[in-house]
Image (cartoon, grey):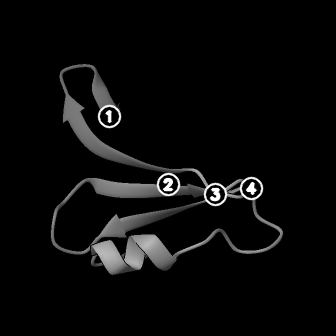
């Protein structure tokens, strides 16, 4: 899902029931994403394409 990843959005978002994880992509910063897991863990990633292909950089 593409949305603007603001602090209020990140605080209130939860993984949908029945899913183990969900990914949310920022609508303003290309490649910036938030992964939300069913256990409540939230992790930011930056997806970038380098010489070896696509990479996911964890923050």
- The residue at 44%/72% (across/down) is 11
- The residue at 29%/28% (across/down) is 53
Label 1 – label 4 distance at C-alpha: 23 Å
- The residue at 71%/53% (across/down) is 39
x then y, percent, for residue 1: 46, 75
Q: Mark 1 — residue?
A: 54
x then y, percent, for residue 2: 37, 76
Label 2 – label 3 distance at C-alpha: 10 Å
Q: Mark 4 — residue?
A: 20
In the image, 45 versus 30, the foreground residue is 45
Secondary structure type for disc 2: strand
Q: Mark 3 — residue?
A: 40
Name the side, left or right, on which 23 lies relative to 44: right
Residue 36: image quadrant is bottom right
Secondary structure type for disc 4: loop
Q: Of callouts 3 and 1, which one flags the residue occurring earlier in the amino acid sequence?
A: 3
Residue 34: give its label: none
Q: For marks 2 and 3, give the one nearer the viewer.
A: 3
Label 3 – label 4 distance at C-alpha: 10 Å
């Amino acid at each position: 899902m593409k949305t603007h990843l603001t602090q209020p959005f990140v605080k209130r978002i939860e993984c949908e029931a029945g899913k183990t994880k969900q990914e949310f992509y920022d609508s303003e910063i290309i490649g910036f994403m938030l992964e939300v897991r069913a256990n409540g863990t939230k992790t930011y990633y930056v997806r970038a394409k380098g010489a070896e292909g696509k990479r996911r950089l964890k923050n």
